[in-house]
Image (spheres, rainbow, N blue to C red):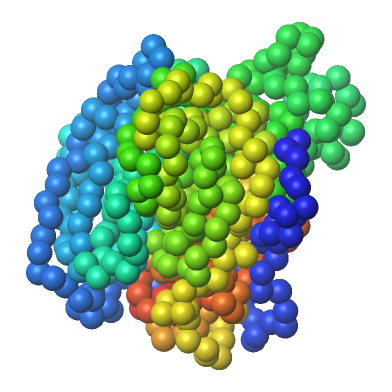
Amino acid sequence: MNSINRRSVLLAGLGVAGAGALAACTNASGSGSSNALADPSGSAVAAAEKKRKSTGRQQKVTLTAAPATIDLGGGVMAKTWAFDGRAPGKEIRLSVGDTLVAELSNQLPNKMTTSIHWHGIAMRNDMDGVPPTTQTAVRAGSTFTYRFITDAPGTYFFHPHVGVQLDRGLYAPLIVEDPKEPLSYDDEWVVLLDDWVDGVTGTPDEVFAEVRQGMGGMDTGESSSSSSSGMEGHDMHDMGGMEMGDSVSPSASASSDGMSMKFMLMGAESDLLGGDAGDVKYPHHLINGRVAADPDVYTGKPGKKVRLRIINAGGDTAYRVALGGHKLTITHTDGFPVQHQEVDALLVGMGERYDVLVTLGGGVFPLVAEAEGKNANGFALVRTGSGSAPKPTGRLKELDGVIMTASQLRAADHVRLNSAKTDVTHQLKLTGGMEKYNWAINGKPFDMDNPEANPIMIEEGQRVRLDFFNDTDMWHPMHLHGHTYQIGTSGPRKDTAIVLPKKKLSVFFDADNPGQWMLHCHNAYHGEAGMMANMAYPA
């Protein structure tokens, strides 16, 4: 278990912001599929798009999704799917108000469909890339062109929204620059974090096939009654950190029906995440597509101020990030500015992004992304002078220093929501567990065959409050498409926020972008299992 000092504890109130008296509540399940929902390509969506300020400039790109063999460094070659033969894909960078015109060409094998979701961008609904809700999935051999205005500067990224393709190599950064950038700095470094399994020990589909069977029938040598009562979150303290597959006994690596336990991670625990840290055993944790043994290197000069744009593109891993010998000044999260905070390290859940400023010292320094609770690291180097590179195995003291989590941040004054009466409150209980792998929202898994069932209804012009209550034994990074919410009454503006086990998180946003929008856990496997809902405007 990771140790956390007293300063860290003072800052670790993640997941409890915004508790208090509820406004008038409505049930998050809505009134079933009898609601007529907004058409993702309808007139209300077009009207909202016309309100977005445009520069008139267009940036055109072609993104070809196809099989590729990727060199991860250190002799590790991974067979995966990637955009244009590289992972991460090539960065897209444009200015706020520019229109992105991106043609997706699907060259995936086995008639596999795909899409692109532009994570964090508040755009027109029919460009959001979420089959079957906002578009038909792009068939193999076909193309689809995404066209939308980027109306808010910030650090974003893009990835598929079909199955568990998020956990392959199909992702890349999307940076929207502010022509009136108020920050002063000398250079930028985009830092993409990822947990990697594809083409090394298996595929994400194989991972999902294993974990979705749950742990209820796993033979751990205990009676069925004891195992079924104590494994809802697989917080298995009595197993001492054992990973399934370790040669403890013949039965320890297989369930009673012979199910392989190749990918299941046992005993991953984190105080910062409230207990269970993750489900999946990853052979590598990458920074900018490189393994720790052969790291990415940023070269700069002492005394220069650098903006790090940190993106967690992982499927199942939160990262504790620090730069050896340096303090980090947090300036943004999920694209939106915050009141600056100086920290030693920060916690980044899947789908979250943080911008930090750092003034570089002289020498060679490790940038470490500790896989929270998983006893593994992503590793890169910052080189500003001569000297030998530090080893990736040592633990940075900064990782146990002041650790800032989202609920301690405050929105910058000019992006804080105006004070307003809450018009509608939705109570969203996060449900499920590892025993049956039945992740859901309010006990109802999302139905891909009937995506308009059980919508969470909101109306244009409303101030909306979402009360997340995590009724599970595991943390969930909850991501809302098409909008940016505020944590509590003065917290940061975000689109993805961690909700800790058995804790409540209240967020607020203005319903100003008509359509049908996914609200889901950004753990790739939890979302695919059903922890997803359709937040929809009426027709």
- Residue nearest the viewer, comparing 109 with 400: 400
Query: Can you tell which quarter of the image residue 162 is in?
Result: top left
**Horizontally, is 513 left or right of 260 in the view?**
left
Residue 366 visible in the current orientation: yes
Kindly identify the residue that appears in the image at 74 percent across and 45 percent down: 4
- 190, above or below 220, in the image: below
- Residue nearest the viewer, comparing 340 with 222: 340
Name the spot of residue 470 as percent of width and height, x first: 69, 58
Residue 78 visible in the current orientation: no
Query: Can you tell which quarter of the image residue 296 is in?
Result: top left
Name the spot of residue 323 as percent of width and height, x first: 51, 40
Kindly identify the residue that appears in the image at 78 percent across and 11 percent down: 248
Tally the numbered discs.
Answer: 0
Which quarter of the rendering shows the N terminus?
A: top right
Kindly identify the residue that appears in the image at 35 percent across and 75 percent down: 514
Name the spot of residue 147 as percent of width and height, x first: 18, 59
- Residue nearest the viewer, comparing 175 with 413: 413
- 439, above or below 56, in the image: above
Kindly identify the residue that appears in the image at 52 percent across and 79 percent down: 464
Name the spot of residue 8 as percent of width and height, x first: 71, 53
Which quarter of the rendering shows the C terminus?
A: bottom left
- Residue nearest the viewer, comparing 129 with 60: 60
